[in-house]
Each structure stands twice: as structure tokens, then as C-alpha cells.
Image: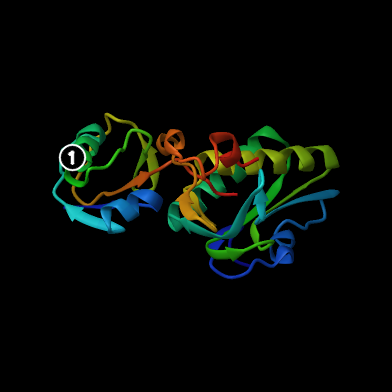
Amino acid sequence: MGKNYWITDKPIQVNDCIAKVIRPKAGAIDTFIGTVREFTKGKRTLYLEYQAYAEMAEKKLAQIGDEINEKWQDTETAIVHRIGRLEISDIAVVIAVSTPHRNDAFEASRYAIERIKEIVPIWKKEHWEDGTKWIGDQKEKTSYQEKLPTEEEMSDD
Amino acid sequence: MIDVLFFAELQETVGNEKVSMEADGMTVKALKEKLSAAYDLSLDHAMIAINQEYAAEDAMITNGDVVAFIPPVSGG
């Protein structure tokens, strides 16, 4: 039912994503869940705000699924990303990949989250106690005042 | 006319998520320069998508296109 790659403004149900990739040929489903972290290098996040170019983001998520299918054999991938205001520990993204054998599923889900951070038009805005900032805007990374995070602190791994 | 979409920090700077304008026959590079000047934007790090596909600097824009400025992404 429905598509395998989608953007939602509602809380994510992990099982909705997993259900998309369950199939008899699979012997493994690897699930990655990205959640909102409270502290990044000692700096407290109050909440995050995500924005997406939703139609294009869904296309790019599907492209990642196609890339996975080229790199590993016989995969089925589903990815959902949430937008809007997210509180600490809320789920921002879920990736599920099913494959016949476990190693491919582990590798492919790792690949998917790295590619999301490269090509999918989704942005997050940090809301701290002392300010806000859209993350990923590299040109601004050199201009932080002392109270704001350093470039290293902003990197999101 | 084309529609130009802005996101994240660019959207806040422009004050609009969408702007309609004449740009038939312009390259991506020329449109970037025009909008940089008009809105005092720094678009050096922004990628461009034409009709939801990433486009190169020398790509040509035609009437009816939807052009989006994509600042460095930070999903996940």
C-alpha cells in the first residue's frame, strides 16, 4: 500500500516503514532510526524544525533506493522523513532495507543515511536557548559568535 | 514566467517561499546573479534544481519551469 519513499508532518510509526520491505525473499531487514539529540558537544537543543522540498525530496529518496539496488543485489528499501517541529527523541527519519542476507542490509542502510545528507532537499533548523540556525549553510559556518557552536560542533554524524 | 522556490535560510532572507518572474532563456548562472543582486543573497553554496532535478550552472531556463534554490542540505 502506498509509496516506499515519503515525507510526513506526522509522527513516524517505525513499523509502517518496515512493513514496506517485508517479503519472502528477504532474510534480513536492517532499520536505521534517526532521532533528535538533545546535546551536541555540550550545547543543548530545545527542539528542531525540519523543512523539505517535499516532491523533490521523495524523488531523491527513491533515487537512493535505486542506487542501493544497483550496488547490492535484490534489495527492497523504504525511507520516511518527518518535517515540522520535532522534540527531543522524536524520530526524524526511518530507513528500512531488506535483503536476502544480513551483510547487505547493514551496508545499504548506512549508505542510505549518508546519501540523504548529500542529495535530499531537507533542512533542519536548530533551536537553542540562545538562538536559532538553519544547519548546513556552509558559508555561515565561519561567522559564528563565541556563544554559538563551532563548525565541528555543527557537524552532524 | 517561471516560479522560483527558496528554502531554509534563503527563504527567510527573501521573505517568500515562491517568487514568479520572467527568466525565459536565462542560464542558471545568470538567474543566480540576478537574484543575488535583487535580494542581497549569497547563492554561492546553493545548488539549483529545475523541475525537481539538479541542474548545472550553464543549464537553460525556459518558460513554465520551476526553479528551486537548494542550500546545503541537512536532513537525517
For the question of whether residue A101 can be seen, the reply is: no
For the question of whether residue B17 can be seen, the reply is: yes
Residue depicted at x 45% and y 36%? A138
Q: Position of residue B4 (x, y in %)?
A: 26, 51
Q: Nearer the viewer, residue B11 or B58?
A: B11
Count the marks: how many? 1
* Above or below, A141 relative to A87: above
Q: Is residue B5 left or right of residue A33?
A: left
Q: Quadrant of the C terminus of chain A?
A: top right
Q: Is residue A26 left or right of residue B44?
A: right
Tell me the crowding category of disc 1: few under 14, some 14 to 19, or many 20 or more residues within 10 angstroms, Cα based.
few
- Give the amino acid type for the residue marked by disc 1 in the picture: Ala
Q: How is the image coloured?
A: rainbow
Q: Position of residue A147 (x, y in %)?
A: 52, 45
Q: Please identify the residue farthest to the front as the structure is shown.
A: A146
SS for tag 1? Answer: helix
Report the chain holding disc 1.
B
Q: Which residue does the numbered mark 1 point to in the structure image? A: B37
* Above or below, A120 relative to B44: below
Q: Position of residue A153 (x, y in %)?
A: 60, 39
Residue depicted at x 21% and y 47%? B39
Q: Quadrant of the N terminus of chain A?
A: bottom right
* Above or below, A42 relative to B58: below
Residue depicted at x 31% and y 58%? B17
Q: Please identify the residue farthest to the bottom as the structure is shown.
A: A10
Q: Position of residue A133 (x, y in %)?
A: 46, 50
Q: Is residue A56 left or right of residue A20?
A: left
Residue depicted at x 67% and y 38%? A111
Q: Nearer the viewer, residue A145 or A122?
A: A145
